[in-house]
Amino acid sequence: MRETPTWRIPFGIVSLFVLLIVYGVIVARYAPDIIGNWGGAAQTVVYVVLGLIWLLPLRRFLIWMETGSWHPPE
């Protein structure tokens, strides 16, 4: 268990917030141009996938914030 403060946690929180905003702006800017003429069901699937895809690197990022390593502890 960590006993001293680390710079990784505040840096990680701010980085995550900024990266999610950038990702959201990119999706909001370009996705409608690409899938705007598709049916509602297909658009829903695409937006659900795009809404969940940011979770893929989140586990390793949170591990790095807590431990300083990109790999889970043994």
Image (spheres, rainbow, N blue to C red):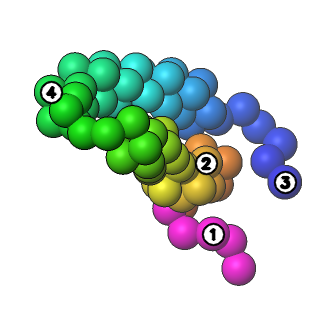
Percent of width and height locating residue 25: 30, 20
Q: Which residues are magenta?
A: 70-74
Say above or below: 5 vs 25.
below
Residue behind mark 3: 1
Q: Secondary structure at mark 4?
A: helix
Label 3: element kind: loop
Mark 4 vs mark 2: in front: 4
Q: Residue furthest front?
A: 39
Discs 4, 2 touching: Cβ within 8 Å: no
Quadrant the N terminus occupies: bottom right
The residue indicated by pointer 1 is 72
Which residue is labeled 4 in the image? 33
Nearest the eye: 66 or 56? 56
Q: Residue 51, can we see it?
A: yes
First in residue order: circle 1 vs circle 3: 3
User: At which x and y percent is residue 52?
Assistant: 51, 46
In which quarter of the view is residue 39 placed?
Answer: top left
In the rendered structure, which disc, 1 or 4, sits on the residue that comes first in sequence? 4
Looking at the rendered image, the disc whose residue lies closer to the viewer, 2 or 3, is: 2
